[in-house]
Amino acid sequence: MLFDILTLFPNIFDGYLSESLVKNAIDRELIRVRRYNIRDWSTDKHHKVDDSPYGGGSGMVLKVDCVVPCVEEVRANEENRGRLLMMTPQGKRIDQKFVEELSQEQRILLLCGRYEGFDERVSQILQPEEISIGDYVLNGGEAAAMIIIDAVIRLVPGVLGDEFSSLCDSFSTGNRLLEGPQYTRPRVYRGLEVPEILVGGNHEQIQQWRAEEAVKRTEQRRPDLFQY
Ligand code: ADE
């Protein structure tokens, strides 16, 4: 699976891409991640990528004549044009179902904005899917792009050590329950004991207990998940 990230700040991704599961997935060639600096497509002699909004107002708007050529050129450099996602708080809010859909793609392009957003003509010309990670405003789309990559690659075969562990995740298809509590050693810590049933070795009982705890936790914390 190929991710192409289009951003004004490619270095923001350095740490994320060089640690843990993601690094491992890249090293094993299960995923590829390429970064492009939108500024490289600026035709301005000062490498300007933004300008003040027509009609006045605060902030700066990303220029259509940088963003569109950047996306078009990156998109055309592979036979598969891929799925183009624009990170914006005005987009469709993502959920696990959408993440599962993305995990079937061969190529995903993530277009990250900054400042007050993109000139509207970027959307008119490129027709991206406008995607939000939640109802709050970030300083830019980079953190949102990392969240999408993080959620999607868990579902790419081989990325997780245990092939089944993503199937059991809260929100995965067929599972609309939160996960219940988990414990590891030590068995007693500051007087708090691991539930007896988990150390008893009866797998049927343990499964049953986990299922009940998942329902309890969902009822307490996210009753809205039952309304489907
Ligand atoms: N850029 C700024 N805020 C965002 C959000 N909530 N989701 C996606 N991209 C964003």
Image (cartoon, rainbow, N blue to C red):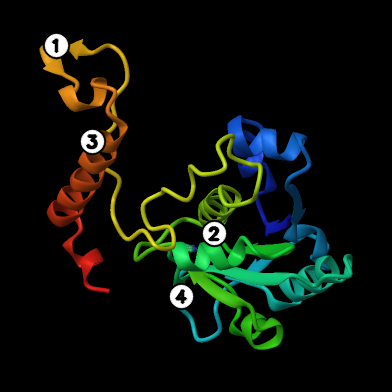
Q: Which mark is residue 124?
A: none
Q: Give the secondary structure at mark 2.
A: loop
| Label 2 beta carbon less than 8 Å to ligand 1 | yes
Above-or-below relation of 210 to 38: above
Please report whichever mark, 1 or 2, sits nearer to the chain's N-terminal start. 2
Closest to the camera, between mark 1 and mark 4, is 1
Badge 2: residue crowd in 10 Å (few <14, some 14–19, many ≥20): many
Q: Give the secondary structure at mark 3.
A: helix
What residue sits 21% from the left and 39% below the top? 209
What residue sits 36% from the left and 58% below the top? 175
Q: CA distance from mark 1 to mark 4?
A: 45 Å
- Amino acid type, label 4: Lys
Residue holding disc 4: 92
| Label 1 beta carbon less than 8 Å to ligand 1 | no
Residue holding disc 1: 190
Could you say where residue 3 lies in the image, as x and y percent from the top left?
71, 56
Q: CA distance from mark 3 to mark 4?
A: 41 Å
Please report whichever mark, 3 or 2, sits nearer to the chain's N-terminal start. 2
Please report whichever mark, 3 or 4, sits nearer to the chain's N-terminal start. 4
Q: State which quadrant residue 39 falls in.
A: bottom right
Q: CA distance from mark 1 to mark 2?
A: 42 Å
Please report whichever mark, 2 or 4, sits nearer to the chain's N-terminal start. 4
Above-or-below relation of 128 to 153: below
